[in-house]
Image: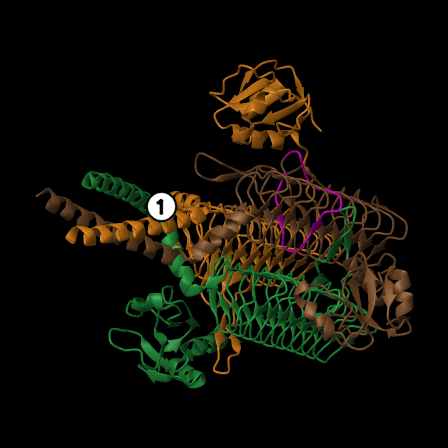
Chain colours: A brown, B orange, C green
Amino acid sequence: MPTLTLREIALRLRCRLEGDGEIEIRGVAGIEQAQAGDLTFLANPKYHSKLRTTSASAVIVSDDQPAEGIGAALLRSRHPYLAFAQAVDLLVPQTPRPRGIDPTSAVAPDAVIGPDVAIGAFAIVGAGATVGARTTIYPHAVVGPGARLGDDCTLHAHASVREGVVIGNRVVVQDGAVIGSDGFGFVKQDDGSHLKIPQRAGVTIEDDVEIGANTTIDRPAVGETRIGAGTKIDNLVQVAHGVSIGRRVLLAAQAGIAGSSVLEDDVVLAGQVGIAGHLRIGRGVVATAQSGVPNSVPPGELISGYPAIANREWLKSSAVFRQLPTLKKRVADLEQRIAELEEKLAAWQTSTRQ
Amino acid sequence: MPTLTLREIALRLRCRLEGDGEIEIRGVAGIEQAQAGDLTFLANPKYHSKLRTTSASAVIVSDDQPAEGIGAALLRSRHPYLAFAQAVDLLVPQTPRPRGIDPTSAVAPDAVIGPDVAIGAFAIVGAGATVGARTTIYPHAVVGPGARLGDDCTLHAHASVREGVVIGNRVVVQDGAVIGSDGFGFVKQDDGSHLKIPQRAGVTIEDDVEIGANTTIDRPAVGETRIGAGTKIDNLVQVAHGVSIGRRVLLAAQAGIAGSSVLEDDVVLAGQVGIAGHLRIGRGVVATAQSGVPNSVPPGELISGYPAIANREWLKSSAVFRQLPTLKKRVADLEQRIAELEEKLAAWQTSTRQ
Amino acid sequence: MPTLTLREIALRLRCRLEGDGEIEIRGVAGIEQAQAGDLTFLANPKYHSKLRTTSASAVIVSDDQPAEGIGAALLRSRHPYLAFAQAVDLLVPQTPRPRGIDPTSAVAPDAVIGPDVAIGAFAIVGAGATVGARTTIYPHAVVGPGARLGDDCTLHAHASVREGVVIGNRVVVQDGAVIGSDGFGFVKQDDGSHLKIPQRAGVTIEDDVEIGANTTIDRPAVGETRIGAGTKIDNLVQVAHGVSIGRRVLLAAQAGIAGSSVLEDDVVLAGQVGIAGHLRIGRGVVATAQSGVPNSVPPGELISGYPAIANREWLKSSAVFRQLPTLKKRVADLEQRIAELEEKLAAWQTSTRQ
């Protein structure tokens, strides 16, 4: 592991140094696990108090973080989280990317392979496929016939890029992800059986997309499935046929988007969210974990629950949900009290009439 | 891409032609994306108004669709969606299926391989396995020892068919799907540890089943896991050990079925639905997206929510859920009003008694 | 299939025999499917009545199970489920584990391979990796550079063990599971784009863990992701970066745990449960199916719902949820009745004042 002085790190991360610049930093660690010689970072505001107890030699903090009580040296940044990302890149060694084309790989004679491409053992590049410069294909990844990968992409082991799929530059596909599997499209026939609608149209993955492990992205019958530039998709996510996802969208693990829905730019789906088919989710919409979205959502909304509603309303309703047994009892009490009142009043009315 | 006149297409799709039969049709497209030369289809009733604005040269519509205002030629069908499926098959070229047995594949000497089977690079057919006529095994698919595949099946890349699994005819398995992994069966021992119950029984997939990408179907300890004929399973679905699924069932993406449950014929689970273990879901039951089903369900029900209840009731309760803060306030108001009434009445009672 | 007399089986399973010890037992089957010659077991209390109607020749029951009405011979056990697991192991033949190192596999020259290791066709063991004694690597599994597998492990087909992952002894990884994929960690930059935080830290899987098919376990940027000894993970589960899971934890299918959360020993998550990030789930917590857990949970709780609350409260609230339309109507009725009372009282007050 490389060792750098804190002063050097501050320089490279463009942080303002407070404390001893000569400290040797060996690694980056979480605020609780960090030891002497480690640089750390306040990832979660919950752990704010840990700034005072961490054993780290240095901490990346925001410009306005009060220094009192913190024993470690400080690296101040306008973007502490960004500085942390850079620190990891600087201090944590990377497994070197493989080089060359493994003799056991199967590259079609007519495939077009760019300069400095790495292709691992048993990986396949199909007939007529294109692989851009400096792209890395790990062992056991399959690039189907006619598929196109751009420059500087990474396909991890067991990834399937099916026939004709088009992938831009700097796209990362984690292990076991499937791009271009057949959409789930069937027609119910008179006898109750389901006839397959041939799913032969394409999938386009734009630049700088990341696709998580074992995530699946289907091709449609007509049109295309598209993932916009800079979108990041976590593991085990389902993107159905004909879905169109905008730029810089974040899809957390196990989210699912049904057929033909549109997610505009900057949408965020937390874990296990489900989006029904044929919807439009407006720009910047955020759906909290496990939300189920049965209707289109205008831009900018923060939504929760199933069926998903405005988060603020959902929080209030959820709070009352817990009190429902009490609320029900209160209603029953009211019914009893009002019955008594009615009775009393009736009796009295009778008595005063007499 | 083939070009056909609209008249020829009408003939092949058994549609009634209204308009210029000489139009050359080059492709099939969605109603919004279609250009001149395209045939399109009204996939979603939401888009009904788009019939008038589409640039498509022709549209497949139902027999009773009013023609007024539609500029495109019409192909009338009793089953427009079926005709659309056939149109895709007719007009969108298919990547040709691979042929022959790739020299890099590993086929066991005692495996029985039918006529016209295709086996891709690095694919494996284990000892004693059987592969039926015209079945296509894509690169990197693994057929375990003793497994049996019928005729005209397709195993896509990275599919795992484990030892002894039995698969019928015309079954399609998408990339990365796993059939026959060990069921999740453990016994808690006195020391709190979990002893594995050996999962050694079989999985049977009947004819005309489709299994989605990265879906998992487990084998049980005893008995079998069975998927009935004509059932279609989407991506990332979990079918646990000993589950029995009937015929023509539809399981949308990310649905999960716990151990030993039975789904009768024609059940439909929408996306992310969960079925608990040891249940019976009656014929034709439909569970809407994200439903959680903790109890058996009689045939024909439409269910929703968690715990799942009749969809009609769930819709009503969900509507009230959103109003819960208001409802709570109304109850509080009532309590105050009734307290005032009670007080007033008591005071009055006292005063009139005097 | 081996045949044993019931007496021999009783001896080996340490059960008390009631009935004819000379019966030949050929197999183990479910209580409904069992035929003459089969041993069965009461797996689900729901099926209690089936003890009287089963065709099995013998049934494993608890010590205190009344014998009356049961036609089959009995094997009495203090732990019937454990005895069942042993019976399966005894009576159901196992596909023999493969032997030797397949000539088509790719084992790095500097990999350390223990005695009696089996490595299947096209499997890969990367540079500097270690594989312990008697470990079985099925075809197409990939062990990344520097990864370490202990003794007696099983990696099924298409499993990905990424670079540097450390796996203990007797660990089973089902088909297509991914261990060590990159965590979903990005920093939002000023221009709205997401910068990847390099995910280079490790994953440790302790002894006796089982990992289900197509499950994904991510590596973090710093620190580690850890799965404790004896923990069992079902299919399609997501374990995010930096998660720490204790010992003997059970994670059912499609559960998901977001980044940096801690699950203490003996936690049980049922199917499709979601745990948010940076939480601590206390020892022995049980979350029922589809629960969504947004906050830390103290040890020993049984929780349900979304947001998850105590199961008992959730059951009560869920019961009222179904009655919400009625409850709303009752509130409306109360409002009307109280308005009438108020009116009546006001009128009366006026009249009596006169």
Chain on which label 1 sits: C
Does the magenta stretch mainly form a helix, a strand or a loop? loop
Residue assigned mark 1: C328
- Point out the image quarter for the C terminus of chain B: bottom left
Q: Quadrant of residue A285?
A: top right
- For residue B350, above or below residue B22: below
Q: Is residue B157 in view?
A: yes
Q: Is mark 1 on a helix, strand or loop?
A: helix
Residue B221, percent across and down? 48, 68
Count of number-bearing discs: 1
Amino acid type at image mark 1 = Lys
Q: Is residue B101 in view?
A: no
Asked whether C168 or B305 is in front, the reply is B305
Q: In this view, does A231 lie to the left or right of C270?
A: right
Which region shows up in magenta?
A222-242
Residue drawn at the location 40% of the way across and 69% of the way down: C43
Asked whether A346 or A73 is in front, the reply is A346
Let me know if residue A235 is in the magenta part. Answer: yes
- For residue A250, above or below residue B191: above
Let me know if residue A127 is in the magenta part. Answer: no
- Point out the image quarter for the N terminus of chain B: top right
Mark 1 burial class by Cα count in 10 Å: few <14, some 14-19, many 20+: many
- For residue B110, above or below residue A287: below
Residue A98, percent across and down? 84, 61
Q: Quadrant of residue C19?
A: bottom left
Residue B197, percent across and down? 50, 73
Residue drawn at the location 27% of the way across and 78% of the way down: C67
Asked whether C152 or C146 is in front, the reply is C146
Asked whether A264 or C160 is in front, the reply is A264
Q: Is residue C351 left or right of residue C48?
A: left
Residue C120, percent across and down? 70, 67
Q: Is residue B346 left or right of residue C247?
A: left
